[in-house]
Every structure is written in structure tokens, then in C-alpha cells.
Image (cartoon, rainbow, N blue to C red):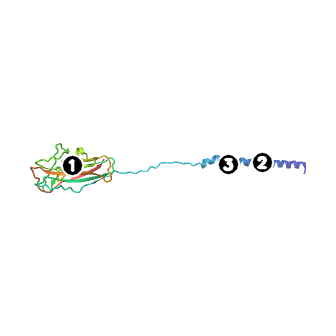
Amino acid sequence: MTLLSQIKNKIMIKIKKIIFSLSIVSFIVLTMVIFGGYAVVEPTHAQATSTSTLVVASLLVTDEITLTAPSAFSLSPNMGMTNSSSSATGTWNVKTNSQAGYTLNLHASQVDALAATTTGEVFQDYPEAVAGTPETWTATSTAYVFGFSVYGTSTPTGTWGTGGDCGSGGSPSATLKYRGFNSTTDIQVTNASAETGATGNNTSMCLTATQGVNVYAPDGLYQATITATATTQ
């Protein structure tokens, strides 16, 4: 082998070593870049993310009201020449979910509400000293009269008295206050400011008819038609 060939071989060997060394360095650098970049980038991808939103659930509760009437009133005992006073009791029940409460109104179908079914004869509506203002019952000696009072939940005792029953033996209660219907206009008897329980609120109505010591009511069947209206506030 000539000297020139030997020199070329030595140069080629060195070049290969240099290329090999560069390849190793490049591989190491590339590996560091890849894994180093992964270490930088990966935590971003590995870290959990979250988002939130609001969803509204709605329920509409409508206000409702029911009114349960008593069975037909039947005044007792019967009135005649020897008995001058007769009364009846009935209860109106109101149920409502109205938070503002309710009102209960009563009215009769005609002035002088208690009328004979055949002759047209009537019991005079109770004549208050102050028209429309309930008062303790006072019998008049020369007339036969018909009136009412109420007591119960949310019934103002300042207006209707403090009694808790309708009296006894057909006589009006001494602790309730009475008035006549006097017109066909609604008369408010209850004013509640909140909803009732599931059993409702009771308003008891006391009907009373009396005849004076100097007069007899003509015989016959007498009836009054009474309407109650319960309204949410």
C-alpha cells in the first residue's frame, strides 16, 4: 500500500469517527429535546380542567280556594203562639293555599230574607240601631224579625262579638252581635291574611228569628236563600 493510500485510509477512519461522534451527540441532543419538551408540554395536557353552568328548575304553584257549605239550615224549635224564638247553626269551611289569605262574604237573595214560600209574608231583617253595624240582639215587641251572627277563625270579634256558640233553646247568644241582611249586597264576615291548613278554616253562622210579645208571625213555611263567596286576596 502506498503512503498516499495509507494517509487516505487514516483520514477516512477519522472522518467516520467524527461522523459517528456527531451522530451520538445529535441523538442525545434530540432525545433531550423530545423528552424535555414532553416534560414541559405534558403537565399542561395531564392537568384536569373543569367548567360549570347554571340550570334553573321552576315550579309554579297556583293559588286555589274551596268553599264547603253547611247542609240546609233548619231553625228550631218551631215558632208558634207559645214559642217566640228559633235559631239554627251552620258552618262554612274554606281551604286555600293563597299566602295573602281570603275573604268570606255572605248575602241573601232579597231584602227581608226570610219569606213565606206561599203567601209572600216576610220576617223583617233585624233592624240595627246603626244600620249595618252588628249589635247584641234586642227583641222588638211589635215585629217578627230575622238576623244572623258569625264566629270562627279570622272572624273579627270586635264586629261580631266574642261568643263561641249560637245560644241555646232557640234564643240568640248573649255574647254575639247580630245584624239583618238588609240588602242583597255582600257582607264580609271573615278576612284571613294567610293560607289555611289542609283542614281549612271554619266560620260558623248563627241564624235567629224572633217574634215580639205583642205580635204573632203568620203560620207557614218560611225560607231564606243565602249565598257565601270565598275569594283569595
Question: In front of the other: label 2 or label 1?
Answer: 1
Point out the tag, 2 or 1, that comes first from the N-terminus: 2
Residue 20 in percent (x, y) is at: 78, 49
Give the residue number, with chain letter if any, for mark 1.
Answer: 149
Dot 3: few (<14), some (14–19), or many (≥20) neighbours within 10 Å? few
**Mark 1, secondary structure of its residue:** strand
Q: Residue at x 83, y 49 (%)?
A: 13
**Mark 2, secondary structure of its residue:** helix
Residue 101 in percent (x, y) is at: 31, 48
Amino acid type indicated by mark 1:
Ser
Residue most extreme to the top: 130
Residue 105 in percent (x, y) is at: 25, 49
In this rendering, would 23 be left or right of 126?
right
**Mark 3, secondary structure of its residue:** helix
Residue most extreme to the right: 2
Residue 35 - label: 3
Amino acid type indicated by mark 3:
Phe
In this rendering, would 20 be left or right of 32?
right
Amino acid type indicated by mark 2:
Ser
Tell which of 68 and 62 is nearer to you. 68
Give the residue number, with chain letter if any, for mark 2.
Answer: 21
Tell which of 196 and 22 is nearer to you. 196
Tell which of 98 and 9 is nearer to you. 98
CA gap between label 3 and label 1 equals 96 Å
CA gap between label 3 and label 2 equals 21 Å
Tell which of 110 and 178 is nearer to you. 178
CA gap between label 2 and label 1 equals 117 Å
Q: Are marks 3 and 1 in contact (CB under 8 Å)?
A: no
